[in-house]
Image: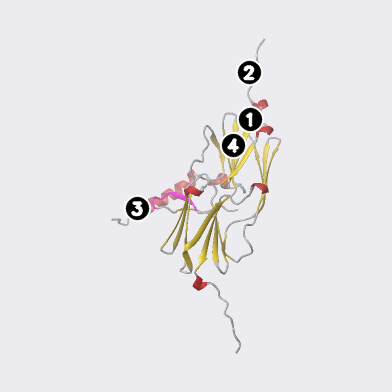
Amino acid sequence: MYTYDIFDDMLNLRDVVNSFFSENYGKWRSREFPYLEIYEGRDELEVRALMPGVKSDNLDIQLVNDSLLIEGEKMNDYADNPYIRKERQFGKFRKSVKLPYRVDANSIAAELANGILHIRLKKSEEAKPKKIEIK
Amino acid sequence: MSEATITNGFANNERVIVPLTDIYETPDQYTLKLEMPGVTRESLDILIENNELEIRGTVNGFKPENKELKYSEFTHNNYYRTFSVGNDIDRNKISATFENGVLTLVLQKHEAVKPRKIPVTVQ
C-alpha cells in the first residue's frame, strides 16, 4: 500500500532543481539543428547528429579546411492535411563544426541510420605526433 | 527547432524525452508522426489501453567503444509520450512504421464515424 508523503514530492522537486545544474543546460543555449555530439578516440573522431526525417539524398557533408560542414533539407512529409498538433519543423539547415585536429579527407565515412547521422573521421598523418631521430 | 520537453514519465522517476509530434486528420484516419532518433524498431513499445495510447522508445548502445565524449548537444534519455484517444478509433486497425527516426502511427476511424455520402433520390 502506498501512503502519500509530502516529503516524497519535496525530494522530487529537489532532484529536478539539482538536475538543472548538473546537466549544463547553459551549454545548449547556442545550439542549432541538427544537434551534435563529438567523440574522440586515439586516431579517430566520430561526429553524431540527430536527424529524424532527413533522407540521405537531401544531405551534403563537406570538409572545409579543418571544419566539417553539414548541409541539407528536411522535407515536409505530409500532404496538406488539416493538423491537430504541429510540433515538428522542416526546412533547410546548415551547420559547421570546427574539428580539434586535421583529418584525412579521403577516409571520411558517413552513415545515416534510425535518424542519426554517424560521421567517422581519421586523423591525418600530418597531425599525428612524429618522432624525430637525432643523428 | 525547440528541444522536446523532459519530464518524469516513468513511475521510477526516470527522466525521459517527450518526442516532438505532428498529428494530422483526414476523413478516414488520424496520422501521428513522432521524432525518435536513436530508437530501433525492436526497442519501440506501443500500447493502447483504456483510451490511452502509450509510446515508449528505448535508446541503447549509443556510446562508441574506445572513444571519449568531447562535446554534446543532446541527452541519451529514453522516449515516452501518451495520447488520449477517443472511441472513434478502430483499435484493431492501427498501423505503425518506423523510418529515418520517425515513427508513423495511422489510426483508422470506425466505419460508423466516417463521413458518408447519402444519395438523394427524386421521386
Q: Quadrant of the C terminus of chain A?
A: top right
Using the image, name the chain to which the residue with label 1 belongs: A
Using the image, name the chain to which the residue with label 2 belongs: A
Across and down, in percent, residue B15 comes to 45, 49
Circle 4 crowding by C-alpha within 10 Å: few under 14, some 14–19, many from 20? many
Q: Which residues are magenta?
A: B11-17
C-alpha gap between disc 4 and disc 3: 44 Å
Tell me, for residue A7, which label it has, or none. Answer: 3
- Based on the picture, tell me whether residue B44 belongs to the magenta stretch: no
Of helix, strand and loop, which one carries label 1?
loop
Of helix, strand and loop, which one carries label 4?
strand
C-alpha gap between disc 1 and disc 3: 53 Å
Q: Image height check: is B123 above or below B40?
A: below
- The disc, 2 or 1, on the residue closer to the chain's N-terminal end is 1
Across and down, in percent, residue A35 comes to 59, 46
Give the mark toward the camera: 3 or 2.
2
User: Which residue bears the numbered disc 4?
Assistant: A46
User: Which residue bears the numbered disc 2?
Assistant: A131
Of helix, strand and loop, which one carries label 3?
helix
C-alpha gap between disc 2 and disc 1: 17 Å
Which amino acid type is shown beneath numbered disc 1?
A: Lys
Of helix, strand and loop, which one carries label 2?
loop
C-alpha gap between disc 1 and disc 4: 11 Å
Residue located at (56% from left, 47% from top): A114
Cβ–Cβ under 8 Å for marks 3 and 2: no
Circle 3 crowding by C-alpha within 10 Å: few under 14, some 14–19, many from 20? few
- In-image side of A112 versus B62 (left or right): right
